[in-house]
Image: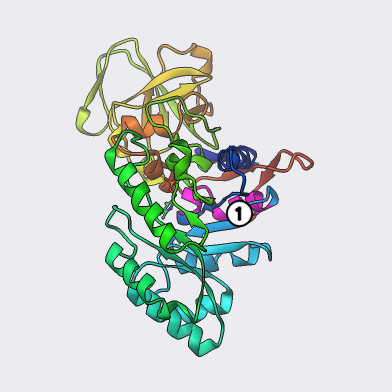
Amino acid sequence: MIPDRATAALTIDLAALVENWRQLRGRMGAGSAVPKDCAAVLKADAYGTGARRALPALARAGCRTFFVAQVDEALSLIDLLPETARIFVLSGPPPGGAREMVAHGLIPVLNSADQIATWAETCGQTGIRAPCALHVDTGMTRLGLSWTEARALVADPGPLAAMEPVLLMSHLACADTPEHPLNTRQLEAFQAASRAFPRLPASLANSSGLFLDPAFRFDLGRPGIALYGGNPTPGGPNPMGEVVRLQGKILQVRQIDTPSPVGYGATHHAAAGRRLAIVGVGYADGYPRAAGNRSMGRLGGWPVPLVGRVSMDLITFDVSDAPETLAHPGAWIDLIGPGYGVDDLAEESGTIGYEILTRLGARYPRTYLSDDASTASVREDPIA
Ligand SMILES: *Cc1c(COP(=O)(O)O)cnc(C)c1O
């Protein structure tokens, strides 16, 4: 139950999340003889949607491989991890943290010769041949072994003897721009890397990578944003289902009788006769301030433009074109949701869906729509 006093409400559709994962896993299977798998990237609290809800739902659907960015993110999830599942930590073992990772069965992505040395040392000390992933940088110049370091490792695999590499991975810089020449260069470099480590399952594709040529898919998909409803094919129709709905409540309706400036900086002027709805959501809730005078809401399905600047706790919509009966204190305006998704709001505010999602606020109540059709469709969130 959303309390009456709430001025905003976030709804996360776990059934849609699971359906998105199934769709992406389907892309991994297409046309391949060898069984292939699809992981789920849960970093940054499952892109703001709640990793402690996303993980069990995805695990029930059969997902067995999860990625997070940091050890603490992994530690906050391991009690939910099925025995047959695994969590990779993209940033690798942190200084002084390798033993704790071994103890909890967390799998580091080793990004440098130093991290390989640390992991080898820890495996030696604990007497456990602990699993790890090797990350080769193929052209993004972010984390990962350089090609020179990777070649050195092939020539002298000694440092790997104490551990158990279980995955070879790299990351695409331009997967959301299919025609970008870097995609082919990265693919060729990764093909060479996987020939150099022929026994390791390989993983290259993020969400957008799964929509490039099938050659990019290798053995394990690593989608994040598409699971949460972001469009992995920018510029084209969104093949993913909507997972996130954010609604803001109308606190007050203003009938404008003389022309009036609206909001901080008086950047909008409302003409006489307009009706404005003041909604209790602002940039403190993760609504982008850059959306001022640019984005839209939906009132009972009617598009309503946001006017004036975004305040910390308030935004204003011009609701003059929606039926008058819909605009009243207590009515909800959709800020992200049916017909106006995460990517739409991102575009109007000069950012990307990833940033919109990961900034979703903590001040409003969250409702999770269950992924499990056999239980009640709406479940409250006892965790948050
Ligand atoms: C975040 C991330 C992903 C997921 O990327 P999306 O674009 O959200 O699908 C995959 N791999 C790595 C290394 C990442 O950092």
For the point 49% across and 28% down, the residue is 334
Q: Does residue 70 belong to the magenta stretch?
A: no
Q: Is residue 250 above or below residue 185?
A: above
Return the residue at label 1: 55
Q: Which residues are magenta?
A: 44-59
Image location of residue 2, percent across then percent down: 61, 41
Say whether residue 371 is left or right of residue 348: right
Does residue 318 appear in the picture of this structure? no
Q: Does residue 58 belong to the magenta stretch?
A: yes
Q: In which quarter of the view is residue 343 placed?
A: top left
Identified by mark 1, the residue type is Leu
Q: Nearer the viewer, residue 86 or 242?
A: 86
Q: Quadrant of the N terminus?
A: top right
Q: Nearer the viewer, residue 246 or 197?
A: 197
Q: Quadrant of the C terminus?
A: bottom right
Q: Is residue 104 above or below residue 10?
A: below
Does residue 124 appear in the picture of this structure? yes
Image location of residue 23, percent across then percent down: 59, 37
